[in-house]
Amino acid sequence: MSFLFPAFLFAGFAVAVPILLHFFARDRAPRLRFSDVRFLERAFVRRDRRRRLRELLLLALRVAALLLLAVAFARPFLEAEGGARRVTVVALDRSLSLSAPGQMALARERALEVVAATPPGESIAVVAFDEAAEVVGGPAVDRSRVRAAIERVAPTAGATRYAAGLAAAAELLDGRGGRIVVVTDLQAAGWPEGARTAVPEHVDVEIVGVPPVERNLAVTAARPDPNGLVAVILNTGPGASETETTLTLDGREVARRPATLQPGATEVRWDLPLDAAEVAAVGVSDADGYRWDDVRYALLGPANTTVVHVVADSGTLDAEAFYLAQALGAAPAARPFEVRPVTPAALSAPPASDRPAGDVVVVVGTGGLGRPARARIAAFVEAGGGLLLVTGPDVDPPLVRDLLGESFELAVEAPEEISPLAAARRLAVVDPRHPVFRPFGDSAGMLGQVRFTRTARVSLPEPGAAPAGAGGRPHVLARFDDGDPALIEYRPGSGRALVFASDLGMDWNDLPRHPGFVPFVQETVRYLAGPGGLPRDAPLADLPAGVPRVPGVITLPASGRRVAVNADPRESEPRPLTPDGFLARVGVAPVAPGGTPAVDGATREAEQSLWWYAVLAVVVVLVGEAWLGRTMA
Amino acid sequence: MSDTASERPALGCLDPEIVASLGSMELRARAVVEGFLLGLHRSPWTGFSAEFSEYRQYMPGDDPSTLDWKVYGRSDRFYVKRFEEETNVDCRILLDVSASMSYGSGAISKLQYGSYLAAALAWLMNRQHDAVGLLTFDEWVVGNVPVSARPGHLRRILVALEQIEVGRRSNVSQALDALAAAMRRRGIVALISDLLDDPEAVVAGLKHVKFRGSEVIVFHVLDPAELQFPFERATRFQDLETGREVTTVAGEIREGYVREMERMTARYARELRLAGIEYCRVQTVQPLDGALREYLATRSRR
């Protein structure tokens, strides 16, 4: 047992007070000369023996009360290695690869075997994972609750991401000793290229394997071509497979034919006029394979375009927004941007509508940006739009305060010029997992090569200040190497806003010259566009919250755009890893110096709250003391 | 065993505190005895004696043996003869003056009460023309006024009672043995003591005296606090004789103490009654007449 505030244990020396009173207070009893003490002695011997026992018990209770009080104030807690309960987390794979007939039932059976083999009294939690993880049960000692949680797990169309499951399981352990049992088919696609993860040092990872399917047929691509439509069908089995393919246009089956699929990918072509059809669905019969990859959907109309308004003093895209427009114009045809320049003055004119018609507003200049315009932009963001505020040379710092609405304090000071003799500032990515940096993967650090000669200073609320609104505090995604915020995210209302504390031209930095500029700008604008930035063919993982994660053609509630949602084609490949190959991807998280668990004592103490028991014991002891003292009075 | 106060209402002049307020032992003794006699219906002095006192007409209920048949022969009327008693009894008063007798929770101590009782007894005995002696003792005999019926002897006893001092530890049996060895004539022995000694030895000593042919009456003088033990708080009790201290919570041990005390007095009462010895337990708050009544009852048996 350890203590959060061990100094309070010194208060335990106060037990000397009742002890001294007990042994010395009797000497202060008045003296009375009496005729004969023989009878006193006889009665005393009998009665006082019992009384002495009671007095000792009374003393013990008083001492115990003081000690318990000292212990309660010292805030005791149990170390994980010692008395803390060990926890087993069952990480159950529910990805698309478990959707083959009988696969999920087998996985649940394996998970139940793990539960049965876990020693009684040990807590068990259940985490179900695909590309995201969800705690579906526990931690609980009650086995019936755990079994019920396992029985409820059903396969999804999501891809496997072991890192997500392990991270959720490790977070659930919260520094306690324990083990993570991953029940999975060990699909190799669960570890994207180069992906690794780590668990705390005192956590064991075990693998319980579920045999993969022998063969899976999947439609991994479907696209129109000048003569009709082309699809790619994958046969993961060792031999050719006789099957049947179908083509459905706008819900009407227009073709069905048998096919012999050789191992590997086979291109299947339908040469027929698509006319004005909007949705095509290519299917393959595969009774034994995965469920969610047998049909692939494709939208046949024009690609979804993300509309971007660029507010620049010049009102053109050839001046201060030149590099920005060029970067957005380089987007692939499947995910195009439509960039529309607008002057601040035009935006300040009486509006035809309450908000700009588009997905994202990029502000690179504020000359003439009146208060009505700023209010319109703030309302646009509140309603779900995106805002990229580039605090470059054409942005007037006092004017930007209104752009995020009243909920957020945004203070931008005058740009600070760095002496030519001084070293230029560099960018340091703080949150490399943020979608803005997704194209860079593990190479987000490459943005640190950009040289910043001038930057704006963005003041953030102090940590102890009042909350900055319903969206929470500003989140710093990147900082300059001197610690000043460089890229800050705000979430006003339903929208998203990013503040870049420098320039996107070549005036204050050399970012446009950097190879990371184009993907950075594109991903930033797509992220700000939210659902409006989705391509026509979107993976399940990119769907906004609240949208059912099943393959098909859906209409996004925010933008009204249609999106063809399909399973990740990599998930259709059942090739497994070996357990050792799996564990080779799992490292050990750094622990605190001295080998202590990553969770500190305060967290553990708060979780265990043993001091309540000590206080309760004090109350019980004091009640006993009062009762005993009353009987002796 | 009997607490005499409960038998007869107290007369004011017999109240120990009033008696204590009187100036001298002689006054105290006289007040006690005269007050006591006032409460009696007939004179205690008439009885078996050779000296004629008076004639009185026979009343129904009179002892027929007292009829004077010569007067009947002369006058044909029944007269009874009344005689004034003459004594031939040696009365010895033994007064315990040990340190434990100095205890008193109220206005007077056991020793004061005992000395008043001894004085009253001596006065009564003297009025009865009995020879009276006084022996005071603690662990040894510390004072002795020999038995005598001579005029002026009573004053000597009263002076001795007025001058007694508190002694040391008590040894009742040793004093009784010494008395028994010195006794030449049978008589009455009145022991006034708190009997805080070994009961077995005390009873043996009293039996020794009884065996020598004397009537023995024991006045067991106790303070009310010794019987009721009214103390409550933690107290250091110091023994008056040994100086030994016992620290205890009085209220806690009261029950056991009172039980022990009652057991002791009950033992004295039982064993002395079996030995034919009168036992009279008196408390220092009780009037003295009860003790005198006990004495007269004993005296009448001689």
Image (tube, coloured by chain):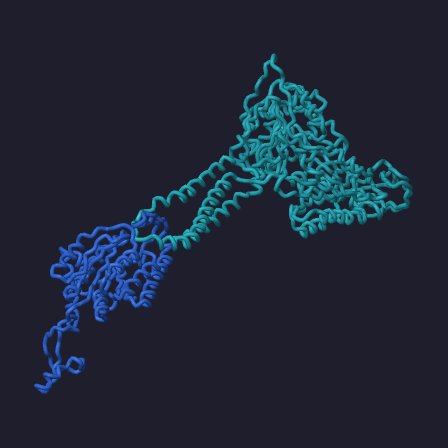
Instruction: Give the residue displayed 10% in from the left and 83% down from the top.
Output: B71
Where in the figure is residue A587, as x and y percent of width and height?
71, 33
Q: Position of residue A333 (x, y in %)?
A: 77, 31
- The quarter of the rendered structure image containing the N terminus of chain A is top right
> Relative to B31, does residue B300 appear above or below in the rendering?
below
Spot the cyan chain and give its letter: A
Left or right: residue A371 versus residue B299 is: right
| In the displayed structure image, the side of residue B119 where residue A24 appears, left or right | right
Q: Is residue A423 above or below residue B7?
A: above
Residue with the most extreme top position: A421
Q: Colour of chain B?
A: blue
Q: Position of residue A399 (x, y in %)?
A: 55, 27
Asked if residue A379 can be seen in this view, the reply is no
A50 to A586, vertically: above or below = below
* Residue A597 visible, this orientation: yes
Picture quadrant of residue A126: top right
User: x and y percent of residue B10 in the render?
Assistant: 20, 65
A332 and B289: which one is in front? B289
Taking A442 as reference, is A242 left or right? right
Which image quarter: residue A434?
top right
Q: Looking at the image, which residue sits at the far left?
A: B75
Q: How many marks?
A: 0
